[in-house]
Amino acid sequence: MANPITKIKRKEVPKEVVYEQNLRVVSEALSENKDAILKGIDLLATINRNGTLDMMNAFVKHKEDALENVMQELNKPQYSETLENLSKLFMYLGQLEMDELQYFTEKLNRGMEEAKQSDGTGKTSYMSLIKALKDPEINRSVTMLLKFLRGMGREY
């Protein structure tokens, strides 16, 4: 029977070889992500120019003091209602049907664009309202508005 192996001699890679491999990997990553790196440098330069980088650096270095000051400021009575409303707003946003809201927002934007193009000087008579209902676009809008008002007024 063979003797058990008691000593394991690990193959040692020289530091120079590891250094060259690491340098090659970093160089390839730089080459593959050149555009992103240049945009990041431009962003960092812009942040530095307007002084935000110094502010962020100071904030990170003194984060405990900064967070304490922010919390003290937020605990003031004048901000309590705002913070309560903010949490309610987030809950409300979670209940909204975004696809339906987008649909109505697009319609509302088109209607405002039409209204903006109007000079607003003409008068509307009862007869012109009745005639306007024959226009399919106006009829569709009035029907949609009536259904909206019915749904809004319905008791559950």
Image: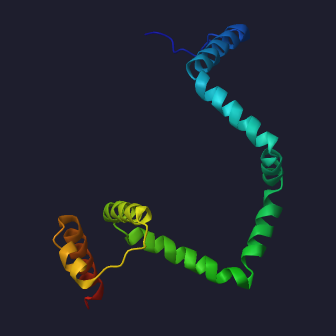
Q: How many marks?
A: 0
Q: Position of residue 94 (x, y in %)?
A: 41, 68
Q: Quadrant of the C terminus?
A: bottom left
Q: Is residue 13 above or below residue 101?
A: above
Left or right side of 88 for 118: left
Left or right side of 78 for 55: right
Q: Position of residue 28 (x, y in %)?
A: 59, 15
Query: Which of the 4 quarters of the picture holds residue 111?
Result: bottom left
Please state which of residues 137 and 102 is positioned toward the viewer in this rendering.
137
Q: Is residue 134 above or below residue 64?
A: below
Q: Quadrant of the N terminus?
A: top left
Identify the residue at image location x=67%, y=14%.
Answer: 23
Q: Is residue 142 above or below residue 32?
A: below
Please state which of residues 2 and 69 is positioned toward the viewer in this rendering.
69
Q: Can the viewer see residue 7 in this picture?
A: no
Query: Which of the 4 quarters of the picture holds residue 33?
Result: top right
Identify the residue at image location x=76%, y=35%.
Answer: 45
Identify the residue at image location x=46%, y=73%.
Answer: 91
Please state which of residues 67 and 33 is positioned toward the viewer in this rendering.
33
Q: Position of residue 135 (x, y in %)?
A: 19, 67
Query: Which of the 4 quarters of the picture holds residue 127?
Result: bottom left
Q: Is residue 73 above or below residue 41?
A: below
Q: Position of residue 19 (x, y in %)?
A: 70, 13
Q: Can the viewer see residue 43 in this picture?
A: yes
Q: How is the image coloured?
A: rainbow
Farthest residue to the front: give it.
Answer: 122
Please state which of residues 115 and 153 is positioned toward the viewer in this rendering.
115
